[in-house]
């Protein structure tokens, strides 16, 4: 039990640190978008690299911040029934959802993106657009990294959900 709690704590710590770091990318994204809007609409000039940087930052925020969002249960839920369920029933749904969908899908994305990322690194992929950003392989590497972090947080969610489901009135040690 102590090892399991330590593992869960370590995963939570990792995703907390990654999430805090990714949060700063939001500030950078706002600055880049403001600069792009200023130069495009007031100075009447546009830079392809700045436009690409906007979606690169957004992709990094989304991919690397997903596990942090899952940790705090702040992801989008489109379910009119779930909100009215008891904590025990929510835990049961989260347990089976994580075990059947979240964890396998995360592993599938990590595994299937492996060659995609390796090939991008091998050819030192850059933007195909003139004036675009170099090192597109860094952005592509965020796909398996982000989904691996979601996989790890999914393990924590599965364990916590199982504990809540089986012992709904017991205070959780690792919470």
Image: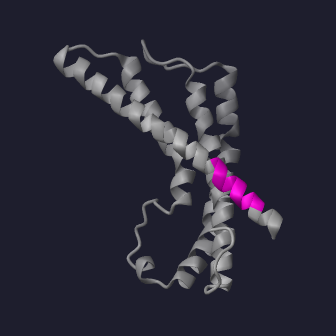
In the picture, the quarter occupied by the N terminus is bottom right
Judge whether 70 appears above or below 60 on screen: below
Q: Is residue 60 left or right of residue 54?
A: right
Q: Main secondary structure of the magenta part?
A: helix
Q: How far across and down, in percent of the image, does residue 114 sit?
A: 70, 39
Residue in the picture at 25% in, 13% down: 45
The quarter holding residue 44 reads top left
Q: Viewer-proximal residue, 59 or 10? A: 10
Q: How far across and down, in percent of the image, does residue 51 sit?
A: 36, 24
Residue in the picture at 53% in, 50% down: 66
Judge whether 5 appears above or below 13 on screen: below
Residue 151 visible here: no
Q: How far across and down, in percent of the image, does residue 52 sit?
A: 41, 25
Q: Is residue 34 left or right of residue 115?
A: left
In the picture, the quarter occupied by the C terminus is bottom right
Is residue 53 highlighted in magenta? no
Q: Viewer-proximal residue, 37 or 27? A: 27
Residue in the picture at 53% in, 78% down: 90
Q: Indicate how the structure is coloured in the image.
A: one colour
| Chain part drawn in magenta | 6-14
Residue in the picture at 57% in, 84% down: 88
Q: How many marks?
A: 0
Residue 173 visible here: yes
Judge whether 57 appears above or below 13 on screen: above
Q: How far across and down, in percent of the image, does residue 68 sit?
A: 55, 52
């Amino acid at each position: 039990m102590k090892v399991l709690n330590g593992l869960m704590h370590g995963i939570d710590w990792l995703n907390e640190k990654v999430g805090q770091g990714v949060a700063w990318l939001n500030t950078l994204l706002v600055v880049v978008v403001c600069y792009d809007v200023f130069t495009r609409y007031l100075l009447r000039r546009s830079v392809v690299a700045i436009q690409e940087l906007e979606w690169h930052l957004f992709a990094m925020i989304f991919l690397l911040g997903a596990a942090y969002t899952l940790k705090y249960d702040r992801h989008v839920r489109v379910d009119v029934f779930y909100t009215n369920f008891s904590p025990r029933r929510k835990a049961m749904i989260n347990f089976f959802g994580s075990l059947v969908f979240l964890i396998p899908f995360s592993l599938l994305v990590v595994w299937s993106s492996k060659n995609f990322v390796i090939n991008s690194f091998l050819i030192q992929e850059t933007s195909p657009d003139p004036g675009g950003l170099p090192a597109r392989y860094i952005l592509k590497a965020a796909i398996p990294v982000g989904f691996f972090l979601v996989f790890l947080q999914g393990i924590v969610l599965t364990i916590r959900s199982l504990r809540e489901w089986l012992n709904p009135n017991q205070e959780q040690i690792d919470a």
